[in-house]
Amino acid sequence: MISSAFIAPALTLTAASYSGSHPNSLINGFHPTRARFGINPNTAHTSAPLVPASLTPARMSLRSPLNAFTFSRQPRLSQVGLSALKNSASESEGLNSKKNDNVPDTIMRPPSELTWDDNKADLKKNFGFSDKKLKQYESLSPEDRKAAYKMMKLSRDFELACNKAYMEKKIAGFMHLDNGQESIPALIADTLKKEDLKCSYYREHCHAIASGVSPDKVMAELMMKATGTCQGAGGSMHIYDKEHNFGGGWALVSEQIPYGAGMARSIQLDQHLGLTDPNSDDRIAVVIIGDGAAQNGRMAETLNTAAKEKLPLLFLVIDNGRAINTFTDDVATETDIYKLGQHYGIPGLKVDGQNPHDTLRAGRAVTDYVREKGPAILQIHTYRFQGHSPADPQHERGRKEEMRWAREAMDPLVIDKADMVAEGIATTDEIKAIDKEVK
């Protein structure tokens, strides 16, 4: 049976506010915003910020070299991990359990302070969850925790392999890496079903893999081989796989949002046409966007449509605080994107994406709500460890310093390993075995 998602035109919406280009793009050394303000792109990292100092701190990027693949052994433990650690008789070998609370004053984007208790309170307030219902999300099995870590490790290694292949000129064209945001593919693999309809943005390699697409097919697509997901015609930004209902990465910022609504509407259309049984068809559509895209007019129009038609649509917002390299606070009045649905009656939740355990728990709860009642927003606070692309010079203020600090203190893999050891979920030897299996 062919779903209407692939035979019916996707819902299209107008977006007059979309300009087709990003104000902080840097192409062949030309920076339109800097040019407008008379800023020399060769000295931009020491120039004054493009917004008044009264609105945002004028913190400049460091000029010291970075080691992209060196991570601290002082992870920031989750609240669960800290509690378990206090009752632990000894410190686990190879993982320093000390919490890193030393956030430099120059870091423009502080870590999330959200806890699972905060998430539960919001689920009760915004989603109407009862205490009884919340209990079913309280804990994850050891097997699920290990599976989530395995997906995160696979995602990290895959992206590192992509970076290596790009530098060796085996991959051409545009490419955008996802290092630091591995809790999102872990959530996708844990929470979504093969039958669910998904579409993402251009940083989607690991989203496709987490949806069940073969890593070999994804890599082949990046290398423009006929064995790729689109026979080499799509490339890095356009991974598409019909078998796993992965509706592609989309290259233009926010253009996937209305198509997510179209996918959700196709599920309702399947039921209306008798192609599926409404009583057993619990599929949902998931549109993955960044915090920058959420500021686009398409977001407001799609929220309105989703609310009006009670679409089974999850807005999964990856909030790394940067739209390309523009600091989101510089251009957004409201950075708590999960609140954008309030006007339309769509509930939302924000979770700490550097805490994979909480991300999965929140993901399960919000996804169940969408299956049962209708649209919702899940905002995941995270950090991106790479530049916008391998060609990104990363001269924007505060960017290099933030990345260096985040790699050392906010690595979700390091945090999750420490938590699992502290909670007795896995030993260091078991984690090493998972690492070896992934490689």
Image (spheres, grey):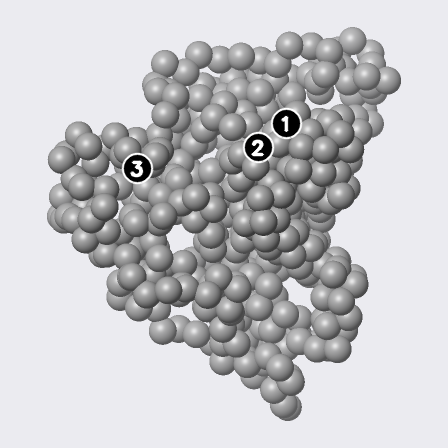
Residue at point 29%, 61% (across, down): 63
Q: Which residue in the protein does label 2 denote?
A: 237
**Residue mark closest to the camera, 2 vs 3:** 3
Identify residue type, mark 1: Gly
Q: Quadrant of the C terminus?
A: bottom right
Circle 2 — which element?
loop
Nearest the eye: 350 or 125: 350
Q: Amino acid at mark 3?
A: Gly
**189 relative position to 109: left or right:** right
**Amino acid type at mark 2:** Met
Crowding near the residue tagged with mark 2, few <14, some 14–19, many ≥20 C-alpha atoms within 10 Å: many
Residue 213 image offset from top left, x and y in percent: 75, 39
Q: Residue at x 59, y 24 (%)?
A: 260
Residue under numbered circle 3: 29
Residue 234: mark in rendering: 1
**Residue lying at 64% horizontally and 90% vertically, measured from the top left:** 89
